[in-house]
């Protein structure tokens, strides 16, 4: 069943200590889209806020009371004090707005319930003064002259006479408030892309002074991603620098790639901090700009059925164990693609080209079929000659006894003309020496049919 909450903020919050005096933060109504897809901005001369339909998302957040508390906690984090927030819930958006306005103006005589159901709606609306309806003064004055002082007095007036004197617009508004007429709302559409900019009040020099603005931008990105059930896999942070001698230097770009979709602002902040530490910004920073480059469908991972085998691992510095993906992403942010990568199989019969390194954030390609014969775990980067002129048989730590083979591999002729590549024509064998080592060797098919060591079996 549809249920609406109205949140009115009076007055608008002053910049908190963690906010700059000049900011392009994400609008409050857009922030509220993390809780529902139906959000309506509210604005007026004395109040601002938003209407939000919570009936469709209450179960997702653990119930109406829990969802309401989460919204209030989020508003407190945005810098709104508790005494400057007036909230009320009702089955119709107009009733929720009216009840919240009555709270904001101090028109409720006794502690009224925060949310009312349909059967309680008239009892909650009737005693409210007409000021709670936010009607124009030219309409309220003649009603007051007639002795009509409360919402209940208006609702008890003859409908035909009221419509003839005051028009049908106000009568329709009353019907929508009480639920006897439909009340469609122009909800805020979800944005198609995310790109947010924030100017800093003063030039920032150290990375520590960027943490507050960066966290606000990432919070906006999290709101955008949650509203669309997405997770970012590529983000770009641009740091803008002050003008020097009449010219504006180009912004510094800090990309962030992720192995899996992510939208948690706290975790993204830690990864960006690692990247900024390595970036060594050339100048002071006067503005930040965050853009989500790529996003994919986000799915939360399910918990384990059984507890982990080890429960008493030590925790140093308050940091618990992290899973492999998070650890790899943190190391990649600190060391770069040259220091942290993953291995992928390649569809090539040549052993030295059957695998390649790839960034950890790249999606794996199609898996190559496994080879029919055994392969060693350790393959040498450069094959080692193991035959001599006076010893035609292969030797490595003594004479080698052939255990299996041959396996003929002839491939690479199609790219023989490319630099640093060549075709291979080999017969591979599994061999063992007098030390008990099991080796992977091959003999060239072309003269002089030299033997080479290519790998070690464990």
Image (spheres, rainbow, N blue to C red):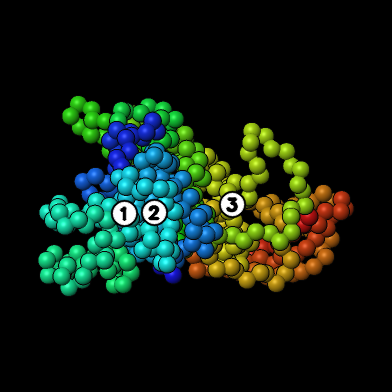
Q: Where 223 sits versus 90, above or below?
A: above
Q: Are marks 3 and 1 in contact (CB under 8 Å)?
A: no
Which residue, as the protein is rendered here, is positioned at the far front? 147
Image point (27%, 52%), residue name? 129
Left or right of residue 81: residue 454: right
Q: Where 326 sits versus 347, above or below?
A: above
Q: Separation of disc 3 and disc 1 at Cα?
A: 56 Å
Residue matched to label 3? 325
Q: Residues within 10 Å of mark 1 (few under 14, many from 20)?
A: many
Comes first in the chain, label 2 or label 3: 2
Comes first in the chain, label 2 or label 1: 2
* Labels 2, 1: front one: 1
Left or right of residue 190: residue 71: right
Residue matched to label 1? 128
Q: Secondary structure at mark 2?
A: strand
Residue 119 image position (x, y, % from top left)? 42, 67
Residue 321 image position (x, y, % from top left)? 66, 44
Residue 154 image position (x, y, % from top left)? 24, 62
Residue matched to label 2? 88
Comes first in the chain, label 3 or label 1: 1
**Residue in the foreground of this view, choosing between 108 and 158:** 158
Q: Residues within 10 Å of mark 2 (few under 14, many from 20)?
A: many
Image point (39%, 39%), residue name? 83
* Labels 2, 3: front one: 2
């Amino acid at each position: 069943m549809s249920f609406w909450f109205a949140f009115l903020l009076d007055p608008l919050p002053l910049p908190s200590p963690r906010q700059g005096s000049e900011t392009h933060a994400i609008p409050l109504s857009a922030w509220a889209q993390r809780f529902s897809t139906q959000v309506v901005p509210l604005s007026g001369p004395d109040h601002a806020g938003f209407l939000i339909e919570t009936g469709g998302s209450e179960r997702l957040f653990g119930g109406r009371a829990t969802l309401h508390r989460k919204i209030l906690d989020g508003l407190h984090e945005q810098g709104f004090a508790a005494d400057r927030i007036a909230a009320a819930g009702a089955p119709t958006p107009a009733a929720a707005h009216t009840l919240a306005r009555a709270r904001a103006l101090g028109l409720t005589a006794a502690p009224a319930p925060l949310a009312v159901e349909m059967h309680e709606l008239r009892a909650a609306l009737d005693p409210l003064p007409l000021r709670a309806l936010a009607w124009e003064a030219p309409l309220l004055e003649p009603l007051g002259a007639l002795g009509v002082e409360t919402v209940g007095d208006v609702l008890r007036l003859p409908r035909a006479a009221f419509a003839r004197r005051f028009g049908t617009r106000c009568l329709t508004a009353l019907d929508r408030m009480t639920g006897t007429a439909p009340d469609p709302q122009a909800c805020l559409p979800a944005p198609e892309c995310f790109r947010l900019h924030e100017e800093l009040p003063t030039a920032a020099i150290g990375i520590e002074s960027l943490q507050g603005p960066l966290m606000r931008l990432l919070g906006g990105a999290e709101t955008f991603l949650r509203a669309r059930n997405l997770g970012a896999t590529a983000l770009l942070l641009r740091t803008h620098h002050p003008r020097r001698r009449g010219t504006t230097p180009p912004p510094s770009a800090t990309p962030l790639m992720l192995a899996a979709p992510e939208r948690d602002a706290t975790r993204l902040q830690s990864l960006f901090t690692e990247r900024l530490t390595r970036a060594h910004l050339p100048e002071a920073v006067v503005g930040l700009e965050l853009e989500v480059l790529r996003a994919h469908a986000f799915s939360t991972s399910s918990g384990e059925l059984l507890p982990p085998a080890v429960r008493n691992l030590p925790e140093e510095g308050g940091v618990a164990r992290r899973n492999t993906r998070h650890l790899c992403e943190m190391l990649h942010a600190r060391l770069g693609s040259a220091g942290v990568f993953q291995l992928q199989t390649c569809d090539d019969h040549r052993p030295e080209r059957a695998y390649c390194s790839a960034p950890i954030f790249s999606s794996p390609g199609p898996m190559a079929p496994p080879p029919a014969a055994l392969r060693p775990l350790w393959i040498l980067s450069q094959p080692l000659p193991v035959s001599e002129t006076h010893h035609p048989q292969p030797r490595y730590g003594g004479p080698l006894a052939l255990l299996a083979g041959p396996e003929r591999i002839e491939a690479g002729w199609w790219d023989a003309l490319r630099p640093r590549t060549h075709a291979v024509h080999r017969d591979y064998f599994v061999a063992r020496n007098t030390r008990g080592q099991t080796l992977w060797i091959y003999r060239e098919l072309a003269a002089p049919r030299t033997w080479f060591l290519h790998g070690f079996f464990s």
